[in-house]
Amino acid sequence: MFVSIAVLCGVLVTASIQAPQFKSRVAAVRVDALVTDGRRPITGLTAANFELRDNGSVQKITDLHHETLPLNIIAALDVSGSIAGEPLEQLKRAYRAVIDALAADDRAALLTFAQNVDLHSSFTSDRDKLRTLADGVDTGGSTSLHDAVFSALTLRETDERRTLLLLMTDGRDTSSWLTAQKLVAAARRTDIVIYPVTIRSVSSFFEVPRPRVHGRGQRQEPSERLLDTLADDTGGRVVYASDESALESTFLSVLQEFRQRYVLSYTPEGVSTTGWHTIEVKLKGRSGDVRARRGYFAQ
């Protein structure tokens, strides 16, 4: 059985965000960071290889994890009418491949959305249950993307697992209660890392790779900007599948990349104990690109 949660969105929008928030006085802040050389993850780094700034102040990294912490995977899958037929079957196969690739201590949850947002299961380690959850999923209707992502964010639990939101969508919202601005604000208040996956052929603006910096005369569609913002603000990245048949390999590559990220922990010093904190993470003594969440709210 699944739970339809679209009817709750009007209440959720006005309620306070229930996902965990960083508290700079009480607990260490954890920053999930991807370090790459070109397109390949860099492994073997230590805390001494990183410089981390909180609101401009250099912080002491007290702990570092790499490929050791168990994962929570939230699969949020767009099943609106545009993927009816074989694309839906390919999507189901891709989801099952992720479940089969989970490690022993990992857990997963499944949420699908069209006009309604349906939670098929919260976090569980029951592989047999997870594999069969998508069997009865069908397509149809409009797309409540904002409501679906917000609902996925509320699933975050206060455990030591790192949480990946694997979001498959074309980025177009047509029926949500929640605005894009409120969704982005909610994403900034959790430590969930969002990896939107989309298909290049869904619409014309997905046909070619998009530059990160847009010069004069270059325009992004609102849906494109939203996926970029959700990924950038949480430290993830937008990933493109060439077509529906590539969804399985794309999902698995996202899972593998997420496993190879670093988790840096520190207790903020010399900064305000409230408000928005900007985080900057850089490498010291070697070259490489770092993707990490842009900041956190302290209370």
Image: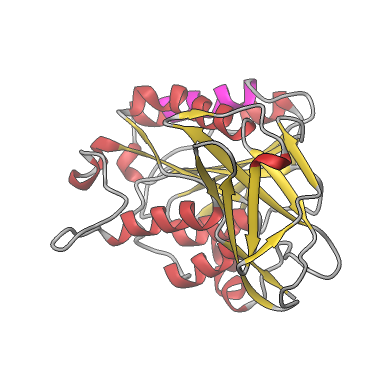
Residue 111 horizontal side relative to residue 160, left or right:
left
Q: Nearer the viewer, residue 185 or 215?
A: 215
131 lies above or below 273: above
Q: How many marks?
A: 0
Q: Nearer the viewer, residue 43 or 85?
A: 43
- Which quadrant holds the C terminus? bottom right
Look at the image and give the residue range highlighted in magenta.
90-100
Q: Residue at x 65, y 40 (%)?
A: 49
Q: Residue at x 30, y 62 (%)?
A: 222
Seen from this angle, which residue lies furthest left? 217
Residue 127 found in image quarter = top right
Residue 8 visible to the viewer: yes
Residue 267 horizontal side relative to residue 12, left or right:
right
Q: Residue at x 49, y 23 (%)?
A: 93
Q: Main secondary structure of the magenta part?
A: helix
Q: Position of residue 113 (x, y in %)?
A: 48, 49
131 lies above or below 272: above
- Which quadrant holds the N terminus? top right
